[in-house]
Amino acid sequence: MDNAVDPDGAEMQNAKITGWGKCLPPASLSNDDLAQIVDTSDEWITTRTGIKERRICHVDVSDMAAVAAQHALAAAGLEATDLDLVIVGTCTGDSTIPSTASKVQEIIGATGCAAMDLNAACSGFIYGLVVGTNMIRAGTNSRVLVIGAEKLSYHLNFADRSTCVLFGDGAGAVVLEPADSETGVLATELGLDGTARSLLEIPVSGTQGERRPPDPETAGITMNGPEVFRRAVTTMGDAAVRVVEKSGLTLDDVDLLIPHQANTRIIDATARRLRLDRDKVFINIGSYGNTSAATIPVALAEAIEQDRITPGDVIVFAAFGAGLSWAAATVRWGDRVTPVATSDAALPPTDRTAMELIQPNIDFFGLGAR
């Protein structure tokens, strides 16, 4: 999708981010905790990924998504009843039928508006941003809530150190509203190579094949790490460069890169493609790990909290994920970096530790403490 111009050359309505929010579960699983279960160490994980800890959720994906949504709505100064579309980017939804978005709609009180799930794995938030933007540009919708929310811990095999150390749970959300063509989403790019889809998958997680009981041998996330890494470095960086060019900007115009938080080495490679110093790249993977579709909206909310974004800044989002999908977007920030209002929405408390929360996985895969 190029700049906001229709086929006849007329200027179209644009879409900008007016609200933002996040939700991170309270229970934290450290690298040292993981070393009690699988053959790994804090040094091994940190040097290869940049991750120090990750959050483990005690509630449903929809609960996290709703909390993030309520913070985003408050930041935008809107009520849930003002929305006309809710998009939830997730690959770990509460259920296949009905959609997770339907539960989020119910929780926040946006009853009656359109709502749908979108699964592009780790690229899901940007995919949702593109859909929401185009709905506003087409005049179909005017206030769109885009959420990225994941509970990846549910699918982790804690005997597989190549995957169990990477992922965590969380949610982030933004509100999109109409804008003039000078601000908002300037350009986007989406892509996917289905021939490589088996490189990152949950082998038996849908209706493929005959119905069978859960089997530890075919359950959990599997990944060809080196090949996914190689493809991610290329596709994410190239897509980021292309959306800057589509926006009619130069790499020197980029003020901040907010990349998918999968691996610090992949993030560094993407920054090099954009010729950006580390101070122009937002990284929070150390605290949360890879939360898939939630990484970018969570990072965006924290970048604003940390005064890393100022009015008029050019921001680049870039992601890759299972499929193998990729996505990128350039955004010119509007004139507001403070929320219109705040929300006290929060997850219910839990008295269970992260280790206790992952015990069902440990039992399922027949593991024990080392």
Image (tube, grey):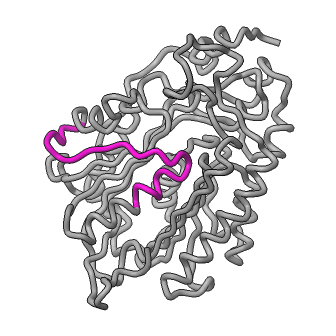
- Tell me where residue 268 sits by quadrant: bottom right
Please name the residue shown 46% across and 41% down the image: 90
- Tell me where residue 7 sits by quadrant: bottom left
Indicate yes or no whether the magenta region holds residue 121. Answer: yes
- Residue nearest the observer in this picture, 343 or 177: 177
Indicate yes or no whether the magenta region holds residue 185. Answer: no
Task: Tell me the quarter of the image containing the N terminus.
Answer: bottom left
- Residue nearest the observer in this picture, 84 or 134: 134
Q: Is residue 69 left or right of residue 34?
A: left
- Tell me where residue 75 sits by quadrant: bottom left
Q: Is residue 347 above or below residue 329?
A: above
Give how far across and how far down residue 151 sits, in percent.
Answer: 51, 31
Q: Is residue 181 above or below residue 118?
A: below
Task: Tell me the quarter of the image containing the C terminus.
Answer: top right
Give how far across and how far down residue 187 sits, in percent.
Answer: 45, 75
Magenta range: 108-129
Give how far across and how far down residue 250 sits, in percent.
Answer: 59, 87
Q: Is residue 17 left or right of residue 177?
A: right
Q: Residue furthest bottom?
A: 9
Please name the residue shown 63% across and 65% down the image: 281
Please name the residue shown 19% across and 52% down the image: 83
